[in-house]
Image (cartoon, grey):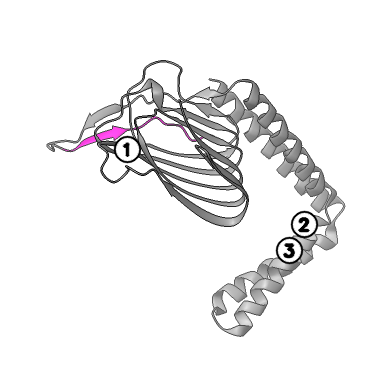
Amino acid sequence: MLRQQKTDHAAWLAMIAIILFLAELLLFQHGNIFSMLFAIGCMYIGRKRMPKLSGIVLFWLGLISFVISLASMVTFRISLFLILVYIIWQYMQSKKAPVQIQPIMTERKHDESSLLERKPRWNNSFFSSQKTPERVYEWEDINIQGGISDVVIDLSYTVLPKGEAVIVIRHLIGNVQILVPYEVEVRLHHSAIYGSAIVFERKEANLWNETVCFQTKGYEEAEQKVKILTSMIIGTIEVKHV
């Protein structure tokens, strides 16, 4: 219900912003109408002529002209400011009340087929921080995307299967913490535009557009092991024992 309310609020705000944008364009920015139409025309013709040089020049000329025209509008600049305020507010709210990740799966049989559809419920979340529940839960491989938030995955409350369990997290801005039992071997493959990586006693600070890989000594032979694949723009990945 809360997620639906947030979606409705965002839809209303977007509609109001579009109405104000059109009002400014039609009432006060008559010159911008022609500039934008010219820019859109250049992009359209340039896209048709690609990969010729004339097509590339026309496309980028149109795109730059469109961005300049858009940035000159007061409504657009106010909208950018309000979006930034909204993102910061959502991030602060997510810090106070992280959303618990709860793997609830449904199974549905296809007609006259033995194939089962398993629908994972590890939710993607742009603003809300996420964490696994602080109680016993059934394991399922994790593949999630996050926006501006934090993620905490505690493997001490679940029983990992024999073989290789997989955690895949793609993130924009924020921190990812993965808590691993001592008896579980780990392999980490992490890439970041800017941030740091803390893996047990090892720390790699000030990563700048880098990819790092770590693996515990007994990973290849272990019966229980976790492969962690993470990528983010800005933030810290931490893997620690519990």
Residue at image point 25% right, 43% down: 221
Residue 179 as seen in the image, left or right of residue 92:
left
Mark-to-mark CA distance, 3 and 2: 6 Å
Circles 3 and 1 in contact, beta carbons < 8 Å: no
Task: List x then y, in percent, for residue 49.
Answer: 56, 79
Whether the magenta-drawn stretch holds residue 120 is answered as: yes
User: Residue 119 in magenta?
Assistant: yes
Left or right: 215 in relation to 112: right
Neighbourhood count class around disc 3 (C-alpha, 10 Å): few under 14, some 14–19, many 20 upward: many
Range shown magenta: 115-125
> What numbered label is drawn on residue 70?
2
Check if mark 1's residue and mark 2's residue have beta carbons within 8 Å. no
What is the C-alpha distance between the residues marked 1 and 2? 51 Å
> Residue 225 got which mark?
1
Quickly name the residue at label 3. 66
Q: Earlier in the sequence, mark 3 or mark 1?
A: 3
- Which label sits on residue 129? none
Q: Main secondary structure of the magenta part?
A: loop
Considering only vertical position in the picture, is 39 above or below 160? below
Q: Is residue 239 left or right of residue 28?
A: left
Nearest to N terminus: mark 1 or mark 2:
2
Q: Residues within 10 Å of mark 1 (few under 14, many from 20)?
A: many
